[in-house]
Image (cartoon, rainbow, N blue to C red):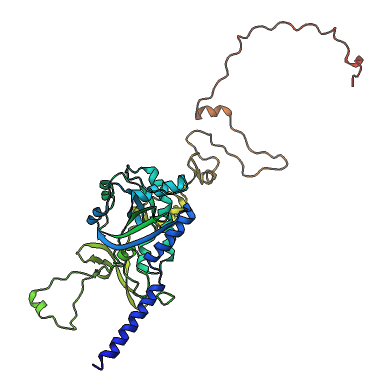
Amino acid sequence: MGLEQPLSILQRKASAGKQVHQARVMTLAKAMRLQAARIADDLFDLPLAIIGIVIEETTGEACAKYFDEDALLVLLDGPERRVGAALVAPDIVGGLIQQQTMGRVTAPLGDTRGMTSTDAAMVAPLLDALFERVTPVLEIEEEKRMMTGYKFGSHVEGPRVLGMALDAQNYHVVRLTIDMAGGARQGDMTILLSHVPEIALLDPDASENETGQPAVPQTLSDSVMRLPAELNMVLCHVTLPLASIEGLSVGQTLPLPQNTFPETQIVAATGRIIGTGTLGQVDGVRALRLARDPIHATQSRRRLSDRDDLDLPEIEALPGAPRRNNAASGSFAGQSDAMETLELGEDMGGMLPALDLPTTFDDAGGDIGEIPDLADLSGGGAIATLPDIGGLPELDDLPDLADLPDLAALSKTG
C-alpha cells in the first residue's frame, strides 16, 4: 500500500501536466474554430462559428457514407497529385450566397435545388482561406502535414463521380458543424483528405536536425531511393569435383582463372547481370571501376570538337603524299612542290620539245645558244593554221583629204 500512494500522485501530476500542454498547443480543432470565425469576418463580414468538430479516419471505400446528394460536392487539389473533397450543406451554401449578394442571412425556406458551378465559386474563397490560415498555426506535425498543400479544385456533379475521384486507400475526415448569423442557419461541412502512411525512412546519419529535434521523414520518392539494394560482385565461376568441395577448409586458397579481375560481373539478388567492371583498389580500399560503352556508341559525334571524347589515335600523313587543302576546289597541298622537281628539258609525253638552254646568262648580251627551228614543233602535236584571207572584198579608194585646214592655223580654245 505504501508504494501505491506515490505512484498515484505521479500519475495525477503527469495527467495535469499533459492537460496544461494540450491546452496551450494549437491543435486542428482549436485552429479551425479560431480561423473560421476570422475568415468569415474578413472576407464576408459574416458572424460565423464552429460549434462542433469531429476528426476521424476512414477507408476509401467507406467515404461514400459521407456523401449527400443535396450537398455541394467539391474536389480539392492536394500536393503530389493527391485529391481531397469537401461537402458543404445546402443551408451553408445558401447563407454564403445571401451574405455576398444581399449582405444578410435569412432562415432557410426548406426547398432544395441542385448545386451548380456558380455555387462552388461562391464557396471557394472560404475553403482556400481555411487551408491557407489554419495550416501555418498548427503545432502538431501530423495535423500540419495532413492540411498542407490543399486548395479548391472543381465542382463535381454527383456522388458517383466524386467516389471515382477519391482513389486513396485511407482518408482523414474533418466534420465541422457551422452556425451562421447567430443561429439563422446551421449545417455541416465535411472535408476528406487523403492519408499518406509514414513509410519514409530517416537518414541514418542524421537522426536529429540542427535544432536537436527528430529529423522529419522524407518523401515517398526519397524513401524508395534509400531502400537497400543487394549487389554481388562475381569474379568468376569455378567448377570443382564434389570430393574437392567436401574437403574445403577455412584458410584454403583456390586458384583463379586468368583475366578474372578485369571481367568482374555485377549481379543483382535475382541473378540478373546488370553490368561489368574491373576490380581493383583505391587508397587501400577495394573498388570496382564500371565498364561503359563509348559515348559515340549511343550518341552521334560529328563535330570537330567531339574528337576529344572519341579516343581516336592521331594519324600523320605519309611523307611526300599530297594533302587536300580545300575539298571544294579539288586542289592539293604539295602539288606546286612536285612541279618544281621537274627539270627543264624533261620529256613530258611529247607536249613540249626538249630545249637546250644555258643555266646562266651573260649580262653583256652573250650568245645563249641556237634556238631550235620552230618547224620541229609539229612533231609534238597539231598546230592550228590561219585561214586564207585572199577572198576579202576590195576596199574603195580613200577620199582626197587636201581640203582639210592646216592644223597650225587653228586657234587655241583653251
Q: Is residue 315 visible?
A: no
Front-most of residues 389 and 117: 117
Residue at 92 percent across and 17 percent down: it is 411
Residue shown at the point (28%, 53%) measured from the top left? 166
Q: Does 179 sit left or right of 270 as displayed?
A: right
| Residue 280 in sight | yes
Point out the image quarter for the N terminus: bottom left
Image x and y of residue 20, in percent = 39, 77
Residue 16 appears at what percent x and percent y?
A: 35, 80
Locate the C terminus by quadrant: top right
Residue 35 point in image, percent of width and height:
43, 61
Identity of the residue drawn at 42% across and 62% down = 134
Q: How far across and how far down the image is residue 267, in percent?
A: 23, 66
The image quadrant that residue 21 belongs to is: bottom left
Is 220 situated left or right of 121 in this image? left
Looking at the picture, tell me which residue is in the foreground, 14 or 243. Answer: 14
- Taking depth in this image into account, of 280 and 410 the one nearest to the observer is 280
- Between residue 37 and residue 243, name the one nearer to us: 37
Left or right, 336 with respect to 164, comes to right
- For the image, the number of numbered tags is 0
Residue 120, placed above or below residue 377: below
